[in-house]
Image (cartoon, grey):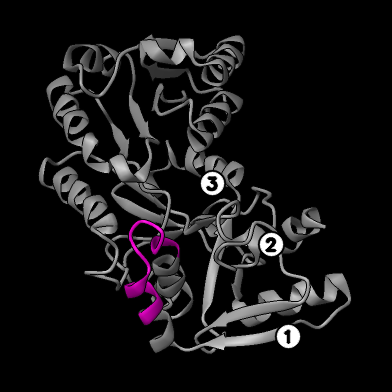
Amino acid sequence: MERSRVLIIGATGSLGYDIAKASLNESHPTFVLVRDSSFSDPLKSQKLHSLSNAGALILKGCLEDEKSLIEALKKVDVVICAIPSREALAQKSLIRAIKLAGCIKRFFPSEFGLDPDKVRVSGMDHDFYARKAEIRRLVEAEGIPYTYISCNFFMRYLLPSLVQPGLKVPPRDKVTIFGNGNVEGVFVKELDVAAFTISAVDDPRTLNKTVYLRPAGNVYSLNELVSLWESKIGKELNKVFVSEEELLTQIKETPYPKNMELVFIYSAFVKGDQTYFDIEASGGVEGTKLYPHLMYTTISQYLDTLF
């Protein structure tokens, strides 16, 4: 089957770069849209040079320049946007351009986290998820074919500290457990998110669907996570339990944006926003069931790198 031509927006970011590499690895004609300023940034320039050498076609443009957007869109079949979540509403201009171009067979908006339609932290997250939900509604209202990727947490977020706010490495003596510690959350490595995303590009089973990632070996409660870490370091940690009420108080008393880490912990490990719903019953599909051949890093393997 002929591979779709893929345009990646945000390819100089961590996830976008991995998606671009995964696209090239799967032999998709791959285009990346970048600002002129990216070439003067040493790290971004290095990434672009690497992608170009691997066969990617570099196109100059940005979300604010409709002409450059439409020119880029007319070269491809599929658009994957990987801009930072805080800039989600910047995709409104991209949606307009997709409608004008009239040739896009699939749009992957910048999501790559918790499902904004499933989270239950309204009024606490400073519209972090509302912005993503707004983009979803706009995509659907415009009749643009889409796939949403809901991968939950990236492994580089919260997991390196064992979900301990303020720490950069896992604790060796004392650990804080939020809630009762039995609510499960999900972590997936960005490299693996990219592989699952590209696998979904030409798959009719993912058209107008949300693809969730809940890999076996990557779904853990805080109690299970701490127990796993204890088994690796051969030591039992002193556990301090923070109740839901205490966590909510901390969130209120911590200024924004520093409290967002606590909001995400509350959402995932107290409310259970990553795992409380059945994927198929909600109309979604699960990535590891669709693509059982894809290998991925487990939480246990990741923790082995933190010694």
Residue 131 position in % (x across, y down): 22, 51
Of labels 3 and 1, earlier in sequence is 3
One can see residue 65 in this view: yes
For marks 3 and 2, give the one nearer the viewer: 2
Which stretch appears magenta?
Answer: 249-261
Q: What is the x, y in percent for residue 160? A: 66, 58
Location of mark 2 (residue): 299
Q: Above or below — where is 188 with respect to 190?
A: below
Q: Residue at x 75, y 64 (%)?
A: 300
Residue 238's mark? 1
Q: Quadrant of residue 9?
A: top left
Q: Residue furthest right?
A: 234
Q: Earlier in the sequence, mark 3 or mark 2?
A: 3
Amino acid type, callout 1:
Asn
Q: Is residue 252 magenta?
A: yes
**Magenta highlight on residue 79:** no
Q: Which residue is mark 3?
A: 193
Q: Measure how far apart labels 3 and 1 are at the Cα level.
A: 34 Å
Position of 184 compared to 143: left or right? right
The amino acid marked with disc number 3 is Val
Along the viewing direction, whichever of 114 and 56 lies nearer the viewer = 114
User: 10 Å neighbourhood of mark 1: few (<14), some, or many (≥20)?
Assistant: few
Q: Is 267 placed above or below 41 here?
A: below
The three-letter code of the residue at mark 2 reads Ile
Residues under labels 1 and 2: Cα distance? Answer: 22 Å
Q: Residues within 10 Å of mark 2 (few under 14, many from 20)?
A: many
- Among the 4 quarters of the image, the one containing residue 34: top left
